[in-house]
Amino acid sequence: MADTALFAPPIPPIPPGELSLLRFLRAIRTNALTMWPAAAYEQPVRSRRLFGRTTMLLNDPTAIHRVLVDNPGNYRRSPASVRILRPITGNGLLLSEGEDWKLQRRTIAPALAPRVMPMLARHIAVVADETVALLTAQSDRPVNLLAVMEGAALQIAGQSMFSLEMGSYGQELRTHITEYGMRWARPHLLDLLLPPTIPTLRDLFRRRFQTRWMRLIERIMQARLQAPPAEDARDLFDLLLTARDPETGRGFSHDQLRDQTATMMLAGHATTAVTLFWSLVLLCGAPAEQQL
């Protein structure tokens, strides 16, 4: 018999239909999950006209493959996403387009191949053991579980990317990411209306943040470059250093390497931490599942 006492996490209300412009603008600044109507969770492809542009939400794998692989030149990221993401990811794979995207994708693909997973798994296992030990040592008092998971996610990112302990950089990385998320990642009306080539006042503050953020990434890269070379790849940074485009033989320039590093450090960090947090919360309410 199912345990009806299991804790069900709260979810934001799902609008039954399309939001008005005012409610849409409010949603993207407060909780972006509330901008999607119920149909967005059911339809394979959904489009909407907004500010004279057609935006698309794709849930169908075939449609996603067409946009990202078969015909990427026919689609563009929204001006708001470029404005918001570029200061923290640079010109890495996430925001590149056209031939530049194809070049970066070809070059970076071997570093993300399945054969690399055992190497990454070793780094993840080390951090997992350290996190379990930390939680065990604090089992007699309240713990900020989300903060612990955020720290673990950053540690995994640092270990996997650089084989470096994040003790010297973890708090600074978290401070930067939190600052950007709370202050500069929230879209405003001008972010939606203006093309990325026309800066707003918020863009100027974002560029100031970008200077500080990229300096931090450069410092971590320099610390990693001072480590003695190894015969075999130890981490993603080794793989990116030696990556070459199979068609041209070109590798990443220093700036490209920095931007790819920033992108990978950021991508998945927050979502990984939140997923781990809720997984543990749900397990706490299901003692039988803890024994599996």
Image (cartoon, grey):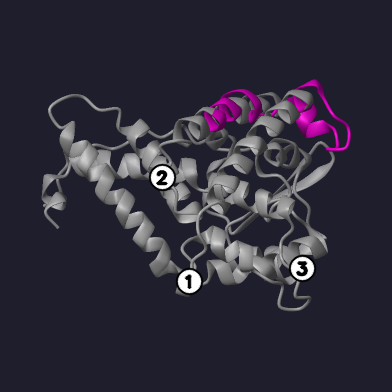
Query: Relative to 217, is 131 on the left or the right?
Result: left
Query: Relative to 40, is 197 on the left or the right?
Result: right
| Highlighted magenta segment, given as a residue range | 176-203
Above-or-below relation of 170 to 188: below
Residue 136 placement (x, y as % from top left):
16, 38
Neighbor class of circle 2 (other Cα within 10 Å; few <14, some 14-19, many 20+) is few
Q: Earlier in the sequence, mark 3 or mark 2?
A: 3
Q: Earlier in the sequence, mark 1 or mark 2?
A: 2
Any magenta on residue 172?
A: no
Residue at 47 percent of width and 32 percent of height: 13
Amino acid, disc 1: Asp
**Image quarter (top left, top right, bottom left or bottom right) of the C terminus:** bottom left
Please give the residue where the numbered disc 3 appears in the rendered image. 71
Residue 188 placement (x, y as % from top left):
72, 25
SS assignment at label 3:
loop
Residue farthest to the right, as pictured: 198
Report the mark closest to the observer, 3 or 1.
Answer: 1
- Front in this rendered view, residue 59 or 283: 283
Neighbor class of circle 1 (other Cα within 10 Å; few <14, some 14-19, many 20+) is few
Residue at 57 percent of width and 55 percent of height: 43
- Front in this rendered view, residue 32 or 242: 242
What type of secondary structure mainly makes up the magenta span?
helix
SS assignment at label 1:
loop
Please give the residue where the numbered disc 2 appears in the rendered image. 165
Residue at 76 percent of width and 78 percent of height: 247
Kindly tell me whether residue 39 is visible in this rendering. no
Q: Is disc 3 in contact with disc 2, using a CB cutoff of under 8 Å? A: no
Please give the residue where the numbered disc 1 appears in the rendered image. 232
Q: Earlier in the sequence, mark 3 or mark 1?
A: 3
Residue 118 placement (x, y as % from top left):
39, 69
